[in-house]
């Protein structure tokens, strides 16, 4: 009986040892896995850090390249602006403007109209600031035509009948929004100069208006002012030409 108990106790002790060794084995396996995972994770972390550092290096180089391109573009822009300013100054200093430009345009028009260059050069050479003009201007008034009131007789002759002047305007609108027969002097008018032979010149704008017309050996300097209702007043000063 005691022999059987002894065997049972030995068996139980052996089982306890086996369980203990298994427990220790499992602990070692788990510890080994943990250590492996730790070092593998650390290695992976180091690889990722290395990859990030490589990407940072690449991005830094790309950023430096873009900065260089930006600086180069800004330098080109500054050079272009400086060149544009030079051309603008050159244009403003060398390209005609104001009265000079108007004279050049008039010369081009006269040449395009068939005037001989030699004739034009002669006239320019004869031009002087002082001129022989009549002592007093010839002054008349005429009715400015509108869409409501238009008559062929609304004209005046100046320069001993050598030039006929007519005018067209925009009808006045009264406070009741009704159109009146007379023209509105605050709005543009059209003044038509007709020389003997039928040649016409038209002057458009808001009164007062001024124009010089050459007819034969005479220059007529006109000034057109607004007058009393429906009327405009024109003054013509005759001067020798050239």
Image: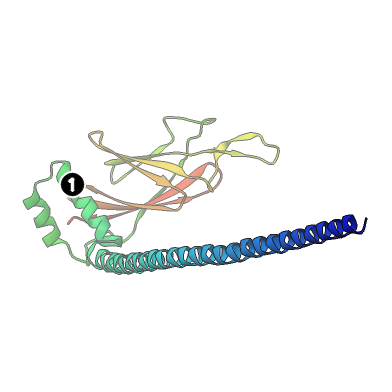
What quarter of the picture does the C terminus occupy?
A: bottom left
Residue 235 or 168: which is nearer the viewer? 168
Q: Which residue is drawn at 19% across and 49% down?
A: 108
- From the viewer's perspective, tell me whether residue 129 is left or right of residue 1: left
Q: Is residue 140 above or below residue 3?
A: above
Q: Which of 159 and 88 is in front in this view?
A: 88
Instruction: Identify whether 242 is placed above or below 199.
Output: below
In the rendered image, residue 148, in percent from the top left (x then y), is placed at 54, 30
Question: In the image as oriented, which residue stretches furthest toward the right?
Answer: 1
Q: How is the image coloured?
A: rainbow
- Total numbered labels placed on residues in the image: 1
Residue 211 vs residue 105, the one in the foreground: 105
The quadrant holding residue 19 is bottom right
- Classify residue 23 as left or right of residue 43: right
Along the viewing direction, whichever of 96 and 197 lies nearer the viewer: 96
Residue 97 % position (x, y) = 28, 61
Residue at (51% x, 49% y) in the render: 227
Horizontal and vertical percent for residue 232? 47, 46
Binning the other alpha carbons within 10 Å of mark 1 as few (below 14), some (14 to 19) or many (20 upward) gives some
> Where, quadrant-wise, is the N terminus in this rendering?
bottom right
Residue on which the image places disc 1: 110
Q: Residue furthest left?
A: 118
Relative image position of residue 43 (x, y in whole percent)? 52, 65
Q: Circle 1 sits in a helix, a strand or a loop, which is it?
A: helix
């Amino acid at each position: 009986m005691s022999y059987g108990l002894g065997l049972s106790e030995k068996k139980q002790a052996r089982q306890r040892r086996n369980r203990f060794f298994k427990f220790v084995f499992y602990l070692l396996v788990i510890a080994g896995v943990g250590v492996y995972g730790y070092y593998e994770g650390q290695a992976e972390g180091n690889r990722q850090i290395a990859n990030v550092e490589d990407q940072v290096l690449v991005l830094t180089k790309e950023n430096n390249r873009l900065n260089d391109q930006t600086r180069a573009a800004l330098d080109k822009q500054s050079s272009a602006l400086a060149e544009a300013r030079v051309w603008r100054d050159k244009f403003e200093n060398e390209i005609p403007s104001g009265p000079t430009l108007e004279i050049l345009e008039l010369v081009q028009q006269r040449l395009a109209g068939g005037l001989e260059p030699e004739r034009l050069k002669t006239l320019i050479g004869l031009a002087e600031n002082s001129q022989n003009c009549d002592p007093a201007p010839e002054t008349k008034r005429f009715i400015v035509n509108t869409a409501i009131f238009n008559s062929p007789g609304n004209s005046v002759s100046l320069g001993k009948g050598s030039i006929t002047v007519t005018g067209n305007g925009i009808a006045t609108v009264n406070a009741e929004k009704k159109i009146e027969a007379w023209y509105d002097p605050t709005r543009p008018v059209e003044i038509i100069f007709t020389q003997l032979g039928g040649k016409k010149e038209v002057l458009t704008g808001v009164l007062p208006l001024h124009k010089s017309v050459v007819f034969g050996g005479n220059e007529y300097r006109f000034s057109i002012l607004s007058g009393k209702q429906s009327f405009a007043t024109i003054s013509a000063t005759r001067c020798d030409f050239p």
